[in-house]
């Protein structure tokens, strides 16, 4: 196994062998918390925990486990270099072709796995009962992604995610990594559109085993998506000796869900690794941006809020 040496500076860390990059941004700057105090306050209504308490949890985890503070690690691979993506309900729409290619271009030596209606039957699902029960493509994708990464390890990425930089540094540093959504999503929550983990990680185990507890809720976000995911992460992250992190929004979600345009070079310059384009493919077309309205899955999305 090759050994890697991290060269660390105050504001960034660059790995001498391989494609490692890190630009350290203050947590609250990267979350823009000063602008979204109301959204932090509203968080308690969703999770029953004060938003400031949850914010402190994520801030402490970030400050403790930021790559700039983990320069003593060996650099050996922890998370498998596998990219998982899912599209069910027909052929992959052309609008996603460019985004898919960015992941392949930035990770030429990684395995790329696209899961579709044709090969998902090869996976034994713990929550097969719930998968068969729902007609919502969003819920089905959620159930699949938790179990795929739990079984195989690697990183899961939504189809509307564009890669800006290699994720090598995260796969050599962490057992689990993900990102917080921008606070313009109305409250403090993790994004479920990108996360990486070693096989069998307890965060995913908890996420999978507690689907039954949230199944009575309406809508993918609460039933199986980011709200459900946030609960599992908050209860499980950082325990048992695992190195886990939830990066503030700038790193994976530099484009807010209410923003219409991306200042592309700005986010590249500040250190973002990827950008989520908010296709909302699990919702009916009327809720999507114009370029994402013709995805060929309109009938499936009728049950989006069941």
Image (tube, rainbow, N blue to C red):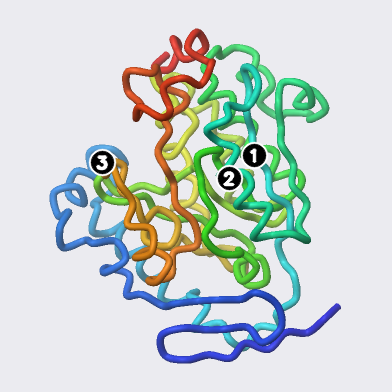
Q: Which mark is residue 295?
A: none
In percent of the image, x 24 and y 41: which residue is there? Answer: 186
Q: Gap in Å between the C-alphas at discs 3 and 1?
A: 24 Å
In percent of the image, x 58 and y 50: which residue is there? Answer: 203
Is the residue marked by circle 2 packed among few (<14), some (14-19), or many (20+) residues within 10 Å? many
Placement of 130 over or under 107, stated as above or below: above
Q: Considering the image in quadrants, where does the C terminus appear?
A: top left
Q: Is residue 297 left or right of residue 73?
A: left
Q: Is residue 293 left or right of residue 91?
A: left
Can you identify the residue that label 3 sits on?
Answer: 258
Q: Are marks 1 and 2 in contact (CB under 8 Å)?
A: yes
Q: Position of residue 96 (x, y in %)?
A: 55, 36
Disc nearer the start of the sequence (1/2): 1
Q: Gap in Å between the C-alphas at discs 2 and 3?
A: 20 Å
Q: Secondary structure at mark 3?
A: loop
Disc nearer the start of the sequence (3/1): 1
Placement of 295 over or under 44, stated as above or below: above
Q: Which mark is residue 85?
A: 1
Residue furthest out toward the right: 1
Q: Which mark is residue 157?
A: 2
Disc nearer the start of the sequence (2/3): 2
In percent of the image, x 60 and y 12: which residue is there? Answer: 133
In percent of the image, x 30 and y 60: which residue is there? Answer: 55
Q: Is residue 291 left or right of residue 28?
A: right
Closer to the camera in the image, 287 or 191: 287
Q: Are marks 3 and 1 in contact (CB under 8 Å)?
A: no
Closer to the camera in the image, 295 or 237: 295
Q: Is residue 219 left or right of residue 243?
A: left
Q: Gap in Å between the C-alphas at discs 1 and 2?
A: 6 Å
Q: Considering the image in quadrants, where does the N terminus appear?
A: bottom right
Closer to the camera in the image, 175 or 119: 119
Q: Secondary structure at mark 1?
A: strand
């Amino acid at each position: 196994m090759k050994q890697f040496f991290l060269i660390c500076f105050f504001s960034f860390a660059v790995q001498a062998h391989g494609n490692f990059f890190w630009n350290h941004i203050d947590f609250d700057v990267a979350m823009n918390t000063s602008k979204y105090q109301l959204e932090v306050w509203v968080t308690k209504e969703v999770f029953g925990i004060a938003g400031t308490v949850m914010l402190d949890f994520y801030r402490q985890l970030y400050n403790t486990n930021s790559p700039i503070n983990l320069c003593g690690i060996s650099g050996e691979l922890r998370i498998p270099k596998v990219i998982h993506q899912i599209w069910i309900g027909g052929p992959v729409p052309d609008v996603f072709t460019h985004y898919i290619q960015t992941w392949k271009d930035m990770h030429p030596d990684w395995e790329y796995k696209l899961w579709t209606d044709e090969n998902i039957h090869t996976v034994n699902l713990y929550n097969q009962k719930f998968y068969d029960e729902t007609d919502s493509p969003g819920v089905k994708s959620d159930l699949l992604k938790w179990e795929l990464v739990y079984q195989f390890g690697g990183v899961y990425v939504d189809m509307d995610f564009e890669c800006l930089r290699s994720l090598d540094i995260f796969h050599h540093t962490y057992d689990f990594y993900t990102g917080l959504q921008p606070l313009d999503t109305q409250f403090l929550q993790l994004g479920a559109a990108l996360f990486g983990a070693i096989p069998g990680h307890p965060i995913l185990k908890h996420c999978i085993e507690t689907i039954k507890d949230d199944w009575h809720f309406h809508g993918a976000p609460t039933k199986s998506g980011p709200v459900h995911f946030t609960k599992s992460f908050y209860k499980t992250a950082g325990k048992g000796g695992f190195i886990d992190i939830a990066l503030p929004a700038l790193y994976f979600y530099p484009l807010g869900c209410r923003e219409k345009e991306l200042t592309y070079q700005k986010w590249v310059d500040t250190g973002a690794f990827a950008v989520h384009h908010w296709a909302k493919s699990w919702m009916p077309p009327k809720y999507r941006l114009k370029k994402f309205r013709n995805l060929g899955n309109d009938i499936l999305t009728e049950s989006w809020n069941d």
